[in-house]
Image (tube, rainbow, N blue to C red):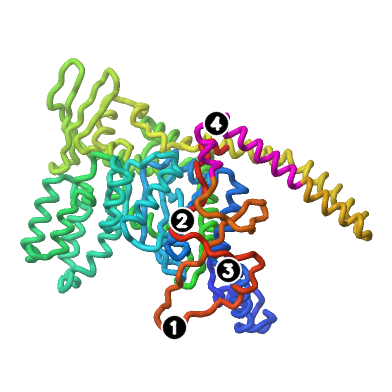
Amino acid sequence: MGTSGLRPMESFTYMCVEAGGEDCVGHTAIDHLNFCSRLRMKQIEAGDAQALIDILYQEQANDPGFYFRVKLNEEGRVCNLFWRDSMMLEDYKIYGDILVFDTTYRTNKYNLICAPFVGINNHWKNCMFGCSFIGNEKIESFVWLLETFKKSMGGNCPITIFTDQDQAMANAIENVFPDTRHRLYIWHLEKNAISRFGALKKDTKFKHVFNKCLKGCVTEIEFEARWQSMIETYGLQEHSWFNRIYDLKDKWCPALSKDFFSAGILSSQRSESTNHAIGFKANKSTTLTEFYRIFRATIQRWRSTEKQDEFTCSRAVPSSTFLISGLLKHALQVYTMSLFRDFEEEFGYSMATTSSLIWSNEETMMFQVSLEDKTWSAQQVCYMPATNKVWCTCTNFEASRWLCYHCIRVLHNFSITRIPNEYITTRWTKYAKSEVWDILKNQDQLQLEYTPWRQIIARKYYNLILKNQAYEETRKLIDESYKTNLKLVEEMLVAATLKEAKVAAPSEVAESTESTTIEPDSSSTSTGVSVPRVLDPKRVVTKGRNKRIKGGLKSKSSKKSIAPQANSEFGSKTPNAHLF
């Protein structure tokens, strides 16, 4: 229950409910708290950071595509940390056009900044690209983190990255992702704005006007007019925060950000849903190892939801307020449920529009499309009948990658019953991840084929142990043969891995086999890999506690401890580009 994110008292309360009362549990709340404390200390008896590093090396042994990097400060303490698994890389290859980078989490007792890299999948749900901890919000830390993330993803950069307001982060993004469009999270702007309203905080009319400027303007002309009217009406000409936000309008105003792909995140509703969906159940007393377990549980929950969404899309047929025919029928065939609803909404608007021909020639026709009795919504649509190419001045397709209602209206006028292929973006379709699912299905099948062999070998070794356990000589022989066989198997696996790497990318072998920056000591994981020794970050003393709790189990570490190198870095080298 602790690994699921429940606090000790919450888990005790749950046990009491399940058992039928506190008297039926068999121990008191104090006993429960003491046991949870001892369990936490046992998990990190070699040091919290060291326990996490051991886990990361074990993850890498289990998943060849797992990638992580660790940076130490001048005292040899962990200050920056990044990791991602192989599925995160696969997700990034498919959905990496949009990246949400949020550094507003403080979810550990060292007050390290937790910075998850989040994307949006084809079901409009969150998918994780990686996670990190950084010690501060300086440019150098952000540059290290973004460069590490970029390297782990094979050098591929997102089209758009969304962040909160942080100048150091903005400078780092410009340095590492020069061709990526940097935009601000509207959800964060809304939260920050409330504290800046002052006496206007209780003025509901002002809030409505501000929200209209923030997310309700369709064109640049409309935005400028509404903003100037708000500034003059409420006397905000000299307000530093509003002036600063206005200078950054290109980074947050939806009306000024339609020439690039944003997946609809610039809308407040989706911005907020993306932020809340992360849902790490951690707090300022959470250790790094506890956080990692909570993180893995969160990712497993996301991936389970994704599989359920995939199954639903392949079986269920959504209901619609419109007759499922023509363009809607085709949209239902290619899009996921979530995206079908978006397309259906645009289709509904298209049925409430009027269109008129402005001009035409042999190849092109230009229409004006607007909602009935709403001339302000008028947009011009260019249509080429020979190729079914269509383009609208609202540029909604460029921003969302699904057709706007203006274009749908024109296509409907010409009895087009299928969405032209060039306007079907793969990342929104049911088959966006089909290749990955097929590979995973084949891997599961292979695992099933290995099961009988594992059972036979396990039974043979178990019988051998039972037969020889009574004699010291035979026990010693079995122990020595195990060590010999383990060494031979590891050597064969390393040789096979190097052979595959040479075939896949000969230039990367040298880099992947070079020594790490830190000289490891004699300690190693269960995989036989030498693990560098590290120190915990300095713990932050929180309010209400003027003494630092001393760890009583550090001296019990069975591993030899040596002083780690200062200002050094270690972890994975070249990412594995061929994961499956």
Pick whichever, 541 or 121, lies toward us: 541
Give the percent coordinates (x, y) of residue 118: 41, 51
Residue that numbered label 3 is attached to: 2
Q: The disc labelled 1 sits on which kind of residue?
A: Arg
Give the prevailing secondary structure in the magenta stretch.
Answer: helix
Mark 2 → mark 1, Cα distance in angstroms: 32 Å
Residue that numbered label 1 is attached to: 545
- Secondary element at image label 2: loop
Whichever of callouts 3 and 1 sits on the residue coming sooner in the sequence is 3
Mark 3 → mark 1, Cα distance in angstroms: 24 Å
- 12 shown above or below 517: below
Whichever of callouts 2 and 4 sits on the residue coming sooner in the sequence is 4
Tag 1: Cα neighbours inside 10 Å, few (<14), some, or many (≥20)? few
Nearer to us: label 1 or label 4: 4
Q: The disc labelled 4 sits on which kind of residue?
A: Ala
- Secondary element at image label 3: loop
Tag 3: Cα neighbours inside 10 Å, few (<14), some, or many (≥20)? some
- Secondary element at image label 1: loop
Nearer to us: label 2 or label 4: 2
Residue that numbered label 4 is attached to: 504
Q: Are marks 4 and 3 in contact (CB under 8 Å)?
A: no
Whichever of callouts 2 and 1 sits on the residue coming sooner in the sequence is 1
